[in-house]
Image (tube, rainbow, N blue to C red):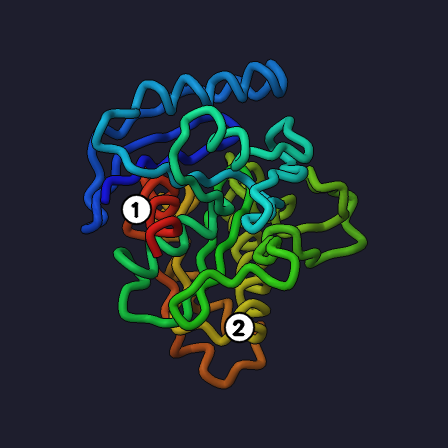
């Protein structure tokens, strides 16, 4: 089965065809033009899909920023995309006449890493994409954990300092997304860098206490810092966890880059 994977982000829309062996072909990127509003950005989604459709495509797997409800197919209120309560899944099915499914972007990327990437071999994976924001995906017993209303996994909006003067795009004070994302790392001096690592380490330690994952997989632009980041996180995060096995939980670089969401969106549909 060939699935067209579509990863809708605040700045880009990535598309590509994915076969049953998770092999990707025809990968392309289209600008979202989110700053120009909902109608323009939705039009960019249609253009991206139309440019990638061929007769071989049997279904469309979509992912987009959360919060969204994969069960109803509605994109609710993503902080970095001007969409509010958009019935995306229905719109795609009506426009293209193909089976389709919708997943949160980091759930999809986490599933790709769990099935085919750096988390392969682990039933329980905590995935974090640390870039302009911080998105998360939780894989438990080999399946995406969506929660009671289908909107679980928004780990980037966990507050680690409720007194902070920094407000997140979601409106809350002191979210890890506001305090430890790529925006905070840009141009950081060494002393500031150490503070940012402690923030991320404290947050990851909490995730280890909460989820006891077999592995923590980190992607996104900040992951390109490599061992300068990962070495310190491995040292710091267990100090912030009550999990007695925290030091045994690997913290590793994701295998996939911009293609993770495309592969994961397709996998979420077929799996």
Q: If the image is split into quadrants, where does the N terminus sit? A: top left
Which residue is found at the position 73% from the left and 56% from the top?
161
Bin the neighbour count of mark 2 within 10 Å (Cα to Cα): few under 14, some 14-19, many 20 and up.
Answer: some
Residue 87 sits in quarter = top right
Q: Secondary structure at mark 1?
A: loop
* Mark 1 to mark 2 CA distance (whole Å): 23 Å
Which residue is found at the position 59% from the left and 69% from the top?
206
Nearer to me, 186 or 57:
57
- Residue under label 1, please give it: 256
Determine whether 232 is above or below 74 in the image.
below
Determine whether 250 is above or below 16 in the image.
below
Bin the neighbour count of mark 1 within 10 Å (Cα to Cα): few under 14, some 14-19, many 20 and up.
Answer: some
Dot 1 or dot 2: first in sequence order is 2
- Residue under label 2, please give it: 211
Nearer to me, 270 or 132:
270
Q: Position of residue 201 (x, y in %)?
A: 53, 62
Which residue is found at the position 62% from the left and 45% from the top?
67
Q: Position of residue 197 (x, y in %)?
A: 52, 56
Q: Please give the count of numbered marks on the rendered protein.
A: 2
């Amino acid at each position: 089965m060939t699935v067209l994977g579509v990863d809708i982000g605040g700045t880009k829309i990535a598309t590509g065809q994915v076969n049953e062996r998770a092999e990707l072909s025809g990968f392309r990127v289209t600008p979202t033009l989110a700053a120009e509003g909902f109608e323009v950005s939705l039009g960019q989604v249609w253009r991206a899909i139309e440019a990638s459709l061929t007769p071989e495509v049997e279904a469309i797997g979509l992912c987009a920023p959360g919060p969204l409800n994969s069960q109803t197919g509605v994109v609710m209120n993503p902080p970095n995309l001007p969409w509010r309560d958009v019935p995306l899944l229905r719109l795609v099915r009506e426009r293209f006449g193909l089976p389709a499914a919708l997943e949160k972007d980091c759930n999809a990327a986490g599933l790709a890493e769990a099935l085919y990437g750096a988390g392969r071999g682990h039933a329980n994976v905590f995935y974090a994409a640390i870039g302009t924001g911080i998105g998360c995906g939780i894989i438990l017993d080999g399946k995406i954990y969506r929660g009671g209303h289908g909107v679980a996994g928004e780990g980037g909006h966990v507050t680690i300092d409720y007194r902070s003067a920094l407000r997140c795009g979601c409106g809350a004070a002191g979210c890890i997304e506001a305090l430890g994302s790529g925006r905070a790392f840009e141009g950081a001096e060494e002393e500031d860098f150490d503070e940012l690592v402690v923030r991320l380490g404290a947050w990851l330690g909490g995730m280890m206490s909460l989820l006891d994952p077999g592995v923590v997989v980190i992607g996104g632009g900040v992951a390109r810092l490599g061992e300068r980041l990962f070495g310190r996180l491995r040292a710091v995060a267990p100090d912030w966890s009550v999990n007695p096995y925290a030091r045994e939980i690997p913290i590793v670089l994701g295998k996939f880059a911009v293609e993770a969401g495309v592969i994961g969106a397709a996998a979420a549909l077929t799996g």
